[in-house]
Amino acid sequence: MVIDFSAFNSGAAPAPVDPRLLFDSLPRVERYEFLRDPQGQVLQAWFERRDERDLVIKLNTGGGKTLVGLLICQSSLNEGKGPALYLAPDPYLAEQATEQARELGLEVTNDPRSHRFTGGEAICVLSLNRFVNGKSVFGLLGDASRPIVDVGTIVVDDAHAALATVREKFTMVVSKEDHKEAFDGLLTLFEQDLRQQSHSRYLDLTTGVPSAVAQVPFWAWSNREARVTEILQGLRGDEELQWSWPLVRDVLPVCRAVFTHDRLEIQPPHPPIGKIATFTRARRRVHLTATLADDSVLVTDFAADPQSMASPITPVSAGYLGDRLILAPRDISPSVTDEAVREMAARLAQRVNVVVLVPSHRQARTWDAHSAVTASTSEQIGAAVRRLRAGHVGLVVLVNKYDGIDLPRTACEVLVMDGLPEAYGGLTRREQVLLGESEGMVNRQLQRLEQGMGRGVRSVNDHCVVLLLGDRLSQLIATPQYRERFGPATRAQIDLSRKVAQALAQQGGDPLPKIEGVADQVLNRDPGWIATARTNLTEATYQASALSPAATHSRAAFDQAALRQFAEAAAHMGKAVAEATDPLERGYLQEQLAAYQHFINEPRAQQTLVQARANNPSLLLPIDGVKATRLTSNAPQAAQAARYLETTYGDRNRLLLGIDAMLGDLAYDPNRVPAFEVALERLGRHLGFEAQRPDKSTGNGPDVLWATGNLHYLVLEAKSGATSDKIWRSNVEQLAHSMNWFQETYDATCSATPVLLHRSNTLERNAVAPAGTRIITETTMATLGQAVRKAMIALADADAWREPGAIETQFQAHRLLAAGIAERFSVKPRST
């Protein structure tokens, strides 16, 4: 030994607190040679603001949020602000974060009881569902059986994705299969209240219709709180319900309760996150998220500080992202079929990995002829991802997995998004019906779309061709006001991609070979594409977050209601209503205001509900009900259609995308019944008829009513969710009930044709349809849809969709004029 270097060591240096210096000191593996510039920028900004209790850090999908979050945890430990807890949305991501921490040389544990964690010497990495539950090892506020675990710093990764887990954990489900006595008892308890809201929906509940959804009116729920509590307390020994009952029982009076045919879901308006005292007492809470503009949900669901949320930490530039070409083939040409796109994707999969994201098993089956692998469970998806990252697999279909998977480089060079997740639970389905096309609901769809599109581009060196299938996805990127809500880098890439799409459309001819050709240019790394794509991102910068003032007041209202301070809750909720600009959302908030007012002034609550329904007719009916408004149709059919089309659509493209989206919703599918009914009403308006949904607006009458002119009407009872090949007696009884309603509501000068929408026209042997009944089957609906689509394409091509004369000509050519339209696109019922 020439020199003993230890002699120069003056003792152990203090552990770095600055996360950038901390990174340099770690014995990390080679692939973490240096921090990316955006990571260094956000770490520096966090370090300067680290004593703010709530902070949100925004990085592009694939921008390295996990590394940032882990360094923040270790920095906090080194500063003595521990223990430090890193929360991932699911077990798969928690496993990934643990692996990454160890590669960095950080000490981590997955055991929240570990003394290394509680002693502030190791980061605890957990999936969120182990932290938020009624039996949490971290303890619950008010539960003396488990002490509250003190944590100094909490980092929530993929905070927007984590919200779904939090809402799920704060939802109690009473299953008809597992808790039949309790379920039946609760359904009987609220039978009359549900019947008053809608007789037909109650029948759907009791006859097992899968699409049936009915909310218990808030006054009935709160007035019977004691009896509900007795029934639910009887289930407290149930192992499954122990995970949720402790989280909702203290706020039970203000919870929303929704029945479906097989369960009762109970959920508070916002998660009472205060029950997880470890979270609310943490000195530092850091929310890592992608670049969606609206962070209001972090305030409503995590009770984050609005002021801090309004000033997110971001890099200087948003342009550090691999190149993506994002194309919606139907936006380029309406003639493109989904199957043609699938065949093109299969051709591309012969040489590169193609990943297809679908929302359901039903949609996955449409890819069976082309897929090498279809994965739906977490284990299957994990195995598929490992194969993709290891080499060429071909075409892989992943079911309902839009976030939490990394597919860098050649793991995914073509990504197909074939639809967005559908709402399956009763609460989410009702919310979807109530909020429809409101800003809040669209923002959620955009978030899922942006998350999904980020799976194949995980760094600045990645590239991916993204193909969007489905009319709804095409609409989201084609509509200017929606595009503005994407993150800056994604928005810049969509804008460039739309220029490419317009150039392809202008070339004419069959667009598929051209789409495949431009995809080849991206995959073959055409220098012109690379230069253009990189230049396009240079100007992308982050903007201040859009934080809804209504969200802040709504959260404050719920916090007061949880304390049973209902006057204060109503005052805050009134401010939320005043801030809402979208009519659907304003009505939705007014319904919640009425629920709080009920505890202090019942008559005023009912008056508020009447006002709410003026903004959103799908809300709860007041106790005194709502009288039906008679439809009249005096204007000529073509003139009414022209007026509706002109006010609904701004240009040719939006018209064609809107028509395709509407016709796509007219699918005979048990999971899409609310969308079907909305689309059926809209179809009537597109055809130049007055249309309404009496059952939705008054709790009585048919699902949809069309006034086709000359005092004639179509009474439309939608059974698009039926799974049987036979029409059951209960179906035709509902149609007969709707015809009775029509005769009571309209005088003898008016006539109506009873129409049932069902996949089959075969009556079950003891079912008797009303006289003159027509059935619109799947087949005849497809024929009607084709006729509408052809007429609208012809009108769009001639730029004549605002002209009554041209519309009448096309409606006549495609047999869409009012006289006899029901008979042309329907069949008679057939007895067995």
Image (cartoon, rainbow, N blue to C red):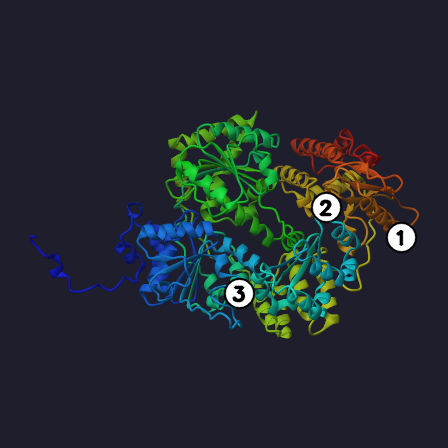
Residue that carries the numbered disc 3 in the rendered image: 273
Assign a secondary structure to mark 3: helix
Report crowding for label 2: few under 14, some 14 to 19, many 20 or more residues within 10 A (C-alpha).
many
What residue type is disc 2 on? Glu
User: First in sequence: mark 1 or mark 3?
Assistant: 3
Query: N-terminal of the two: label 3 or label 2?
Result: 3
- Residue 228 visible somewhere in the drawing: yes
The answer to whether residue 535 is left or right of residue 132 is left
Front in this rendered view, residue 736 or 783? 736
Query: Is 725 in front, or is 661?
Result: 725
Query: Which amino acid does the dot numbered 1 rest on?
Result: Glu
Q: What residue is disc 1 on?
A: 744
Rendered residue at 75%/63% (across/down): 189
The reply, left or right, for residue 578 in relation to residue 150 is right
Q: Secondary structure at mark 1?
A: helix
Element at label 2: helix
Residue 266's place in the image compared with 361, above or below, is below
Q: Nearer the viewer, residue 142 or 423?
A: 142
Dot placed on the residue nearer the N-terminal end, 1 or 2:
2
| Image coordinates for residue 50, horizontal then vertical, percent | 37, 64
**Which of the two discs, 1 and 3, sits closer to the camera?**
3
Question: Which of the two discs, 3 and 2, sits closer to the camera?
Answer: 3
Q: Which residue is mark 2?
A: 677
* Left or right placement of residue 118 versus residue 615 in this view: left
Amino acid type indicated by mark 3: Ile
